[in-house]
Amino acid sequence: MGAGAPTPIAVSRVWRSSTHSGGPVVGQVDTGFAAPQRVTKRIAEGGLGRLGTPAHVSILPDARAQWSDHLEVRMARRTALLLKGVNVGGKNKLPMAELRAALSGEPGWGEVETYLQSGNVVAAAPKGDPASALHELIAARFGLDIEVFGWSGKEIADVAGDNPFPGKVDEPKLLHVAFLQSAPPKDWFATAGLVHDGDELALGRRHIYLCYRDNSRDSPLAKVLRNAKISFTARNWTTVVKLAELTG
């Protein structure tokens, strides 16, 4: 999106201001991801509410209008899409600038941002399964089969807020989060144990906290995760905090 372009929104209702002759008129406009382009182009900057929060913004139907219509809007949901194993050791090379450009050109996507080269995409995503949609786009445009983990802004905020190792936040390289597609197998981890040579695991809803005593490179936790036979992609605490900021 260019500078000053309106944020994609979902419009639930529109009504005329009481200053317009005829009084308030309630009518359904669009319950999909975004308002029609003819409407979004005319939304004034500012005044847009957060997700689920009604907000009044002004639109000008044409240059002759002397009244403002009011919209009740929802911000398009911000989703974090985490790519597994890109730009690592010369494998699965995926330039983030090219990915941003490709995704920004897709219908229903907006505000596409990336963070670092490790494959962290944040965007206002369309309804449905944005992780699968991004997987298919990467396969079609770049010829890569990359697993994508989709996380809502609320889920990312919960991951950051529920951190069981607050004493490690000042050492973000020693605190990681493994993001999964589904809940971790609690029975398996109960048998395998959560503490290994001073390094520790903590299970979340669809993620696992990894707390390292000295470093993550030689940690026995890597073997534990491999033996669990789960698919995941890990991020250090700095990235987790940044994702919470970008999706908040």
Image (cartoon, rainbow, N blue to C red):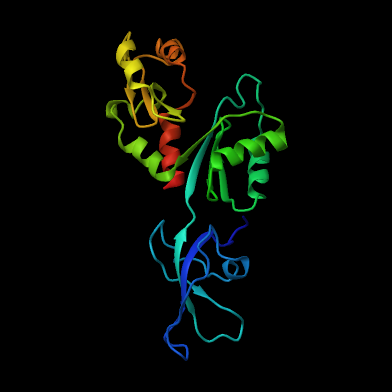
Left or right: residue 220 compared with residue 80? left
Q: Is residue 54 above or below residue 225?
A: below
Give the residue at x 67% y 45%: 101
Q: Is residue 243 above or below residue 66?
A: above
Residue at the far top: name it. 197
Give the residue at x 44% y 43%: 152
Label count reads 0
Give the residue at x 39% y 58%: 52
Q: Residue 173 or 210: which is nearer the viewer?
A: 210
> Residue 199: x and y, percent?
34, 14
Look at the image and tell me in which quarter the N terminus lies. bottom right
Q: Is residue 244 above or below residue 87?
A: below
Q: Residue 74 or 189: which is nearer the viewer?
A: 189
Q: Quadrant of residue 131?
A: top right
Left or right: residue 152 compared with residue 105? left
Q: Is residue 47 above or below residue 146?
A: below
Give the residue at x 48% y 48%: 78
> Residue 224: x and y, percent?
41, 12
> Residue 241: x and y, percent?
40, 37
> Residue 239: x and y, percent?
45, 33
Q: Residue 244 or 17: which is nearer the viewer?
A: 17
Left or right: residue 63 compared with residue 161? right
